[in-house]
Image (cartoon, grey):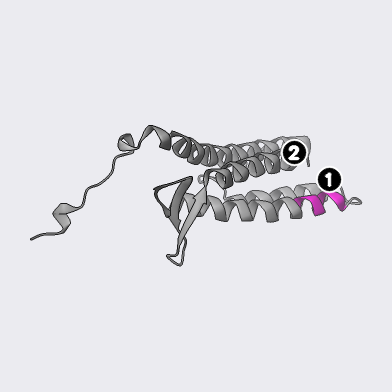
Amino acid sequence: MNHISEIKVRAVSDYAPEDAALLCGVGRLVCAWTMLEQSLEAKIAMMREAMGDVRTVGTRTRPAMAKLMAELRTMVAMRDRRNAGALTEISDIERNMQRIDRFRSLIVGGFQQPAPGGFTCRDTRNNHMHVSLEQLDAEIASLETTAQRLLAV
């Protein structure tokens, strides 16, 4: 007997109503990260324009977050030559963003299935992990706070 034919693929529409919070939370995490990237690109473009440079942020491909952060650091260093406080703030923000990005990658790349109180994921070492909805909400809130701090620099 062919065991492969017995495997059923679960469609997103098959998720139970109680999984709506999970699906919404994952979507909020992805959207919040994308909004942060777009806001950072816009901030860099405004800073460039204020410094007399009117070229666009990216070339043909969208710049990665690391490249955007490096450019922001450079521009802030040029703007605030005598004030290292902004660069210290950027470093702290960047560490927080890296942690959140690892969490986001775990969710996006390792999502397995809903589980009581949250869902299961597999990390890069193939270990099963349970992520609670509270954890997901806390990371989204942290991402939103980090975005506000970054855009205030």
Side of 17 where 137 appears, left or right: right
* Rendered-image quadrant of the N terminus: bottom left
Percent coordinates x, y for residue 106 in the rendering:
49, 54
SS label for mark 2: helix
**Which residue is at 48% across, 50% downward?**
107
The question of residue 88 being in magenta is answered with: yes
Mark yes or no: residue 23 visible.
yes
Side of 53 where 132 appears, left or right: left
Indicate the amino acid at tag 1: Arg
Residue labelled with disc 2: 47
**Which residue is at 55% across, 45% downward?**
136
Compared with residue 32, is residue 8 higher up or lower down, i.e. above or below? below
Compared with residue 101, is residue 16 higher up or lower down, i.e. above or below? above
* Rendered-image quadrant of the C terminus: top right
Indicate the amino acid at tag 2: Met
Pointer 1 or 2: first along the chain: 2
Percent coordinates x, y for residue 65 in the rendering:
60, 50
Using the image as rendered, state which of residue 97 and residue 38 is in the foreground.
Answer: 97
Q: Are marks 1 and 2 in contact (CB under 8 Å)?
A: yes
- Graded by Cα atoms within 10 Å as few (under 14), some (14 to 19) or many (20 or more), the crowding at tag 1 reads few
**Which residue is at 72% across, 38% downward?**
148
Q: Which residues are magenta?
A: 84-90
Q: How many numbered badges does the structure rendering display?
A: 2
Percent coordinates x, y for residue 23 in the rendering:
44, 38
Magenta stretch: dominant secondary structure: helix
Percent coordinates x, y for residue 97 in the rendering:
65, 51
Residue labelled with disc 1: 79
Using the image as rendered, state which of residue 75 and residue 118 is in the foreground.
Answer: 118
The image quadrant that residue 19 belongs to is top left
Give the farthest residue toward the right: 82
**Which residue is at 77% across, 35% downward?**
50
Compared with residue 131, is residue 39 higher up or lower down, i.e. above or below? above
